[in-house]
Amino acid sequence: MLRRAAFTTLIVFAAAYSGATWANHSHHGAASGGQHAAPVETLSLTGAEATVAFSPNGDATQVVVKAINAAKKQVLVQAYGFSSAPIIQALGAAKARGVDVEAILDRTNKSPRYTGATYLANHHIPVWIDDTVAIAHNKVMIIDGDSVITGSFNFTKAAQEKNAENVLFIEHAPSLAKIYTKDWMWRKGLSHGYN
């Protein structure tokens, strides 16, 4: 099921980094005992538009693929589960048309067998593995510094077909995208290259 709504004002609670807080983030091993996420920030997103989809067997994958296909400059990915062929192929196609695509994935995506991470790497998409926490459980895409995909929806076939999940695509929200990008950069700094 797909729902789309335009908001005059959308209030969002999100993490944000100040310059001082950013410098205090450090890597303290896999236990992550020394890592501290940024404090909560409240945003008012005037003019934002939200698209919501649910699974199983709803339009969640379609929402994600459509957003990737519309990207013009950049797609930053954070993912735990990462095996949805339509989503992975859309990222490869975005890269092929000149979009900057980068991904941070959970340790479970580094495997001797062929995975979504392998596909991205084979398409010259930089992939980092975030293994400094117990689980890198984000399900986020930041698109063109203006829009954010988030929710419980893993980028997997199982999430689309078997799980009760949700995906939220918030467009025209550069202040929200900026906060998510700062978190993405923090996690990238604690990650290592896939290859």
Image (cartoon, rainbow, N blue to C red):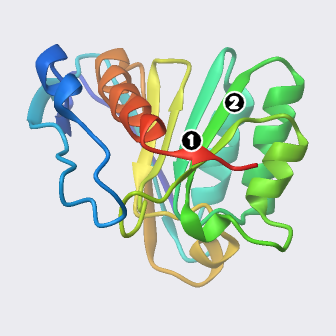
Whether residue 153 sits left or right of residue 69 in the image: it is left
- Residue 184 position, x and y percent, is 42, 35
The relative height of residue 166 versus residue 12 in the rendered view (above or below) is below
SS state under label 2 = strand
Residue 89 appears in the rendering: no
Residue depicted at x 19% and y 37%: 15
| Residues tagged 2 and 1 counted as in contact (Cβ below 8 A) | yes
Residue depicted at x 50% and y 45%: 191
- Residue 149 position, x and y percent, is 47, 42
Quick one: which residue is furthest to the bottom in this view? 162
Residue depicted at x 79% and y 65%: 115
- Residue 78 position, x and y percent, is 51, 47
The amino acid at mark 1 is: Val
The relative height of residue 74 versus residue 102 in the rendered view (above or below) is above
Whether residue 14 sits left or right of residue 40 in the image: it is right
Q: Nearer the viewer, residue 74 or 22?
A: 22
Whether residue 56 sits left or right of residue 186 in the image: it is right
Image quadrant assignment for residue 151: bottom left
Q: CA distance from mark 2 to mark 1?
A: 8 Å
Give the mark, 2 or 1, whose residue is nearer the N terminus: 1
The relative height of residue 5 versus residue 32 in the rendered view (above or below) is above
Image quadrant assignment for residue 116: bottom right
Write down the residue under mark 1: 77
SS state under label 1 = strand
The amino acid at mark 2 is: Val
- Residue 75 position, x and y percent, is 61, 29
Residue depicted at x 83% and y 39%: 92
Q: Nearer the viewer, residue 143 or 109?
A: 109
Write down the residue under mark 2: 101
Q: How many residues crowd mark 1 within 10 Å: few (<14), some (14–19), many (20+)? A: many
Quick one: which residue is furthest to the front in this view? 28
Whether residue 158 sits left or right of residue 188 in the image: it is right
